[in-house]
């Protein structure tokens, strides 16, 4: 067996595009090559910190006079949320909740539970925060990979389903069904990136970005006023890019079967499990990229639409086009993009546009 984690490569690709052309203090030039004054060049110089948290590599970058304080505060927030949500740390709130089966949770956890349950209902169960027992069964939590039997999956599937949870929002108390375990990892990075954007704004930062293991979230434009350029990884080539998206003030989050998988008897098993079958989603999709102002929503939908497949994902977007856009890559290589972002997306291959009117 073997497994592969390529999300950090996606992060590096994204960061390379985002940082290229931002100008340097040495040259005193912006991305257009126009010479700036010394103070303008200094203002465009980025402050960045790298950190390993939430089982991935992250980079936080901000520009301007308050950048250092904002970046330090953002890193502290990442560490705080990681300690709160980790399923691998016995003292985390989620681990203690999974051990006890019921608990009164913190405000942050409560917000994520509330959003996760809304996604569960809205996606018909394609996104499910109770997926952890299945992840454990397949070995994706500890890298002890194995293919469970049909009988074993049938038993574990009885523990899956957010409709078994009792969520008392007013008191912040969650009670799980028998044998259930919760994992908010499907939206944790998106929630974290949104929190970082809030911190940046509190410190007066108007231009910044964060890359959390391939989850990119952008504040404003680049310092020169142009849009950020975010690379979308080619699911068939870990060192290549499918295309480049020019955008601002949003999260760009990708999920794909190439990120984490193992092979057994010549067959590949990826980590995006279908809560309905208990098996890796066999949807005909290799990757989904969601673009939204809401990082939490984007994170959850990148998984949900992958599980849905192209047709259901397209129908879902048509009903929610005001909240997100998407780039979907099918197994046959077809690239689909919703009409809201197609004009901002550059690809070397043709794009099939998903339109609300179905044309």
Image (cartoon, rainbow, N blue to C red):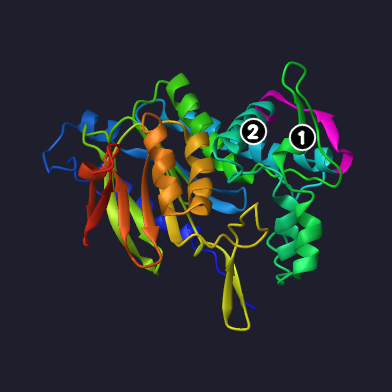
- Residue 18: x %, y % from top left: 32, 46
Q: Is residue 64 left or right of residue 125?
A: left
Residue 351 included in the magenta stretch of the image: no
* 4 and 257: which is toward the camera: 257
- Marker disc for residue 102: none
Can residue 46 be seen here? yes
* 270 and 331: which is toward the camera: 331
Q: Quadrant of the C terminus?
A: top left
Q: Residue furthest bottom?
A: 265
* 309 and 136: which is toward the camera: 309
Quarter-of-image position of residue 125: top right
Q: Secondary structure at mark 2?
A: helix
- Residue 196: x %, y % from top left: 50, 32
* Residue position for label 1: 165
* Residue position for label 2: 117
Magenta stretch, residue numbers: 99-109
Q: Which residue is drawn at the image coordinates 72% and 51% (left, top)?
A: 132
């Amino acid at each position: 067996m073997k497994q592969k984690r390529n999300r950090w490569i996606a992060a590096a690709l994204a960061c390379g595009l985002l940082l290229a052309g931002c100008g340097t203090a040495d040259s005193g030039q912006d991305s257009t090559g126009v010479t700036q004054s010394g103070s303008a060049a200094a203002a465009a110089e980025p402050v960045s910190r790298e950190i390993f948290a939430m089982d991935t590599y992250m980079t936080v970058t901000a520009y301007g006079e308050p950048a250092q304080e904002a970046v330090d505060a953002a890193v502290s927030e990442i560490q705080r949320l990681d300690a709160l949500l980790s399923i691998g740390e016995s003292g985390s709130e989620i681990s203690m909740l999974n051990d006890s089966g019921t608990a009164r949770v913190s405000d942050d956890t409560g917000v994520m539970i509330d959003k996760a349950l809304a996604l569960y209902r809205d996606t018909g169960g394609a996104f499910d925060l109770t997926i952890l027992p299945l992840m454990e069964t397949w070995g994706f939590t500890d890298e002890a990979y194995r293919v469970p039997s049909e009988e074993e999956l049938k038993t574990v599937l009885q523990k899956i389903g957010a409709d078994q949870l009792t969520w008392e929002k007013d008191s912040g108390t969650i009670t799980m069904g028998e044998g259930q375990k919760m994992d908010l990892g499907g939206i944790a990075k998106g929630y974290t990136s949104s929190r970082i954007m809030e911190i940046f704004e509190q410190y007066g930062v108007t231009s910044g970005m964060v890359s959390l293991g391939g989850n990119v979230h952008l504040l404003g434009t680049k310092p020169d006023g142009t849009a950020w350029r975010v690379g979308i990884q080619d699911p068939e080539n870990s060192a290549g890019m499918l295309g480049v998206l020019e955008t601002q003030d949003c999260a760009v989050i990708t999920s794909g079967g190439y990120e984490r998988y193992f092979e057994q008897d010549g067959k590949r098993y990826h980590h995006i499990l279908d809560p309905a079958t208990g098996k890796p989603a066999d949807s005909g999709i290799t990757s989904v990229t969601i673009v939204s102002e809401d990082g939490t929503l984007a994170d959850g939908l990148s998984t949900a639409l992958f599980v849905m497949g192209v047709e259901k994902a397209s129908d879902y977007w048509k009903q929610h086009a005001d909240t997100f856009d998407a780039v979907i890559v099918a197994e046959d290589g077809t690239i689909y993009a919703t009409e809201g972002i197609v004009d901002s997306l550059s690809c070397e291959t043709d794009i099939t546009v998903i339109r609300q009117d179905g044309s």
